[in-house]
């Protein structure tokens, strides 16, 4: 649970995009496009409907003619190339008219409990123009250029769980298709990607007329949907210890199960080698301008060579081969390489791994009230177990408390400021659990072991949030980051990377220490080609034979 390791996680069989497509294909969901009312200027709306065994969900997409000077990835933007809402069911014309008045406004508008998410996206202008021009002339776009960017549009926010009037998570969490985490958001992104493909082809037809062509299916499939993610995700990880614990615990349990396999079958070995080779191709296409990520990609490239060499030398004939490989990796690979290998060994074992996706959600009821009868001695033990590593830090040192988390007044979005350079301390959010636990532990020293925590909190109500977190740790051993989240050298992108890896994101591209670009569903089949045969291994690019 150190940030350096969390910031090296990769997608795996339990990632939410893969969970979604596995279900959609396995249950035979059907897809349609009942509306595509886009004019010659690329302005209008479209509806994409996914229909399953019990329910339908529809993405209502609005395309806009956005001037270049208004295009921005920042959350404070006020206009976008496209805006979206995921509708619960199939919208009527009246529903679409209501959404037309609100969805393009995003935060300035309001949606209803019939909507499950609200989102927006901007074009990658250089690649968009290239693809439109190429298709208009009857040619396919340059694949090297596609690989460098990876997407035609990128989302700057996908809001769900009650924001801006959308349905609360509690109202939909018992639906089987939405029970795993973030399935609403993943479905919205998946359908958005289909809209982007259709829109770029529409614009090419407008420009090229009868000479225009459509994207070759294999080329279109290489394109994902981009995403720009900022600081808002970092507090989420800290503020949801039960949920984050469930994600990490499911992945750790999956790895444990595979490491306990005594013998690997020829089919297991063949599939692992295939995923390893295709991962090498994926890493070779991973482009970043950030010095930290450039170094990580170089290390990962070397790591994959080492893994291939290790397998060629020792094979899989020993007992507990996956465990032996992971033990070897601990001393021979970077953290980036270790975590990719941990994800890859899960690939041959769907029966062992995939059911764990049903254990990754968390209900609001999981966050219980404070147990006031707990003794002081018990509380000290819990704090030492989760935060003992932090008790020897000098929390008065500027190095250790250089940053402060707060919420911006204008956009109500999380920010990370410099404590000693900005007047933000009075507005600080409780996002430094280690510092606060150290303070609570210090105050607990004056209390007898047998006193109860309720008495302590009557005198020290400022420690209520710390006591609650410590008590939650009994059920959530992976709920706490074991690092200082307000130090001068903290990298919020590590928290973003951890969460996004569980989404299933690939090709992380940090743009600073506080925001990152990613690609989602790159390689995935589009809804009109999704099947059981292609729903699983799409995340690994195909190697030319």
Image: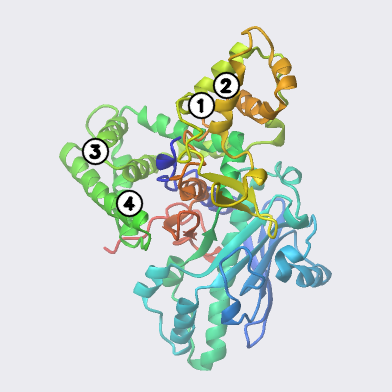
Residue 508 occupies quadrant:
bottom left
Observer-side mark, 4 or 2, equals 2
Element marked by disc 4: helix
Residue 148 occupies quadrant:
bottom left
Using the numbered discs, state the Cα–Cα distance from disc 2 to disc 1 in whole angstroms. 9 Å
Answer few, some or many: residues within 10 Å of disc 1's Cα (few below 14, many 20 plus, some between 14 and 19). many
Percent of width and height locating residue 358: 58, 38
Quadrant in which the C terminus appears: bottom left
Q: Is residue 301 left or right of residue 437?
A: left
Give the residue drawn at x 53%, y 90%.
207
Q: Which mark is residue 387?
A: 1
Depth check, front residue: 97 or 388: 388
Mark closer to the chain start, 3 or 2? 3
Give the residue drawn at x 53%, y 36%.
356
Percent of width and height locating residue 73: 56, 67
Q: Is residue 370 above or below residue 205?
A: above
Q: Can the viewer see residue 23?
A: no
Observer-side mark, 3 or 2, equals 2
Using the numbered discs, state the Cα–Cα distance from disc 3 to disc 2 in whole angstroms. 38 Å
Element marked by disc 2: helix
Residue named by callout 2: 441
Q: Can the viewer see residue 523?
A: yes
Mark closer to the chain start, 2 or 1? 1
| CB contact under 8 Å: marks 2 and 1 | yes
Q: Which mark is residue 332?
A: 3
Answer few, some or many: residues within 10 Å of disc 2's Cα (few below 14, many 20 plus, some between 14 and 19). many
Residue named by callout 4: 296
Using the numbered discs, state the Cα–Cα distance from disc 4 to disc 1 in whole angstroms. 29 Å
Answer few, some or many: residues within 10 Å of disc 3's Cα (few below 14, many 20 plus, some between 14 and 19). some
């Amino acid at each position: 649970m150190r940030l350096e390791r969390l910031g090296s996680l990769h997608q795996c069989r339990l990632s939410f995009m893969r969970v979604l497509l596995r279900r959609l294909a396995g249950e035979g969901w059907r897809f349609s496009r009942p509306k595509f009312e886009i004019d010659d200027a690329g302005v209008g709306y479209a509806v994409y409907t996914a229909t399953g065994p019990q329910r339908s969900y529809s993405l209502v997409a609005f395309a806009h003619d956005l001037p270049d000077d208004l295009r921005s990835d920042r959350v404070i933007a006020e206009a976008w190339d496209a805006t979206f809402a995921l509708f619960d069911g199939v919208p009527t014309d009246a529903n679409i008219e209501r959404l037309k008045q609100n969805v393009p406004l995003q935060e300035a508008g309001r949606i209803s409990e019939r909507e499950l998410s609200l989102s927006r996206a901007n074009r990658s202008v250089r690649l968009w123009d290239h693809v439109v021009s190429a298709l208009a002339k009857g040619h396919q776009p340059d694949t090297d250029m596609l690989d460098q960017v990876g997407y035609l549009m990128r989302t700057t926010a996908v809001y769900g769980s009650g924001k801006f009037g959308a349905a609360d998570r509690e109202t939909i969490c018992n639906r089987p298709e939405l029970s795993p985490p973030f399935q609403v958001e993943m479905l919205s992104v998946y359908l958005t990607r289909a809209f982007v493909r259709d829109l770029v082809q529409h614009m090419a037809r407008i420009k090229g007329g009868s000479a225009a062509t459509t994207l070759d299916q294999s080329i279109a499939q290489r394109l994902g949907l981009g995403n720009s993610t900022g600081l808002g995700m970092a507090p989420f990880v800290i503020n949801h210890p039960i949920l984050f614990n469930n994600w990490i615990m499911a992945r750790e349990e999956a790895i444990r199960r595979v490491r306990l396999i005594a013998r690997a079958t020829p089919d297991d070995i063949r599939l692992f080698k295939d995923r390893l080779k295709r991962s090498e191709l994926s890493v070779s296409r991973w482009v970043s301008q950030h010095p930290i990520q450039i170094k990580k990609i170089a290390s990962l490239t070397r790591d994959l060579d080492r893994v291939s060499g290790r397998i060629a030398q020792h094979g899989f004939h020993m007992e507990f081969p996956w465990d032996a490989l992971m033990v070897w990796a601990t001393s021979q690979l970077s953290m980036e390489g270790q975590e990719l290998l941990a994800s890859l060994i899960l690939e041959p074992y769907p029966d062992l791994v995939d059911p764990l996706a049903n254990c990754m959600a968390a209900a609001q009821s999981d966050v219980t009230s404070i147990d006031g009868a707990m003794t002081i001695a018990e509380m000290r033990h819990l704090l030492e177990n989760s935060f003992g590593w932090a008790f020897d830090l000098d929390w008065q040192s500027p190095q250790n408390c250089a940053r402060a988390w707060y919420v911006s007044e204008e956009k109500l979005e999380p920010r990370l400021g410099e404590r000693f350079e900005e007047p933000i301390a009075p507005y600080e959010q409780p996002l430094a659990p280690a510092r606060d636990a150290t303070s609570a532990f210090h105050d607990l020293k004056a209390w007898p072991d047998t006193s109860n925590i309720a008495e302590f909190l009557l005198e020290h109500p400022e420690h209520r949030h710390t006591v609650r977190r410590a008590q939650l740790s009994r059920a959530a051993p992976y709920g706490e980051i074991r690092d200082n989240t307000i130090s001068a050298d903290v990298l919020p992108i590590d928290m973003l990377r951890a969460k996004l890896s569980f989404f299933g994101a690939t090709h992380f591209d940090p743009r600073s220490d506080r925001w990152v670009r990613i690609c989602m569903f790159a390689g995935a089949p589009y809804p009109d080609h999704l099947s059981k045969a292609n729903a699983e291994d799409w995340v690994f690019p195909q190697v030319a034979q």
